Amino acid sequence: MAESFAFAIAEGVLGKLGSALIQEVGLAWGVKTELEELKDTLSTIHALLLDAEEKQATNRQISDWLGKLKLVLYDAEDVLDEFDYEALRQQVVASGSSITSKVV
């Protein structure tokens, strides 16, 4: 069960990394390279999860690894959620500035 859950989380994080909003914030904050490296690493993990799912039943180390990976994926997802929040906040602030200038 944990492996399927980790697989789903990895897919979600990969999807977020591909969003235009995350790419825009990454460029603005100067972390675009790091985001691309994270995306590459997660793609590899995503592929390995398929194999780990089959082997988990017979190998406790893999089961332990999957549990730890799930926690790391949650952290990555939290960071990307913060990126989304900040990008949206900046858009609201920018649109608020343009609305204020039109009113004045």
Image (tube, grey):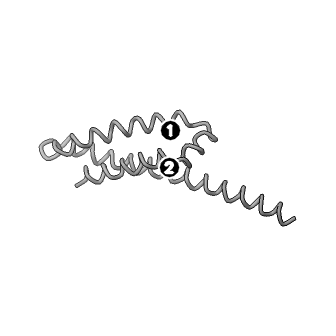
How many labels, in total? 2
Name the outermost residue toward the front.
102
Mark 2 vs mark 1, CA separation in Å? 10 Å
* Rendering quarter of residue 26: top right
Residue at image point 32% right, 39% down: 45
Q: Residue at x 44, y 47 (%)?
A: 76
Please tell me in which quadrant of the rendered image residue 69 appears. Answer: top left
The residue that mark 2 highlights is: 80
Callout 1: helix, strand or loop? Answer: helix
In the depicted view, which residue is nearer to us: 93 or 74? 93
Q: Which mark is residue 89?
A: none
Q: Amino acid at mark 1?
A: Leu
Q: Could you say where residue 17 lies in the image, as x and y percent from the top left?
A: 47, 45
Residue 101 coordinates in the image, percent (x, y) = 83, 60
* SS assignment at label 2: helix
Q: Residue at x 33, y 49 (%)?
A: 70
Residue lying at the far bottom of the rendered structure: 103
The answer to whether the residues at label 2 and label 1 have Cβ atoms under 8 Å apart is no
- Quarter of the C terminus within the rendering: bottom right
10 Å crowding of disc 1: few (<14), some (14-19), many (20+): some
At x 61% / y 36%, what residue is drawn?
A: 30
Q: Amino acid at mark 2?
A: Leu
Using the image, determine if residue 98 lies above or below residue 56: below
- Toward the left, the furthest residue is 58
Q: If you read the primary sequence from the N terminus, does the residue marked by circle 2 or circle 1 appear first?
A: 1
Mark 2: few, some, or many residues within 10 Å (few <14, many ≥20)?
A: some
Q: State left or right for residue 80 relative to residue 8.
A: right
Q: Quadrant of the N terminus?
A: bottom left
Residue 35 is tagged as 1
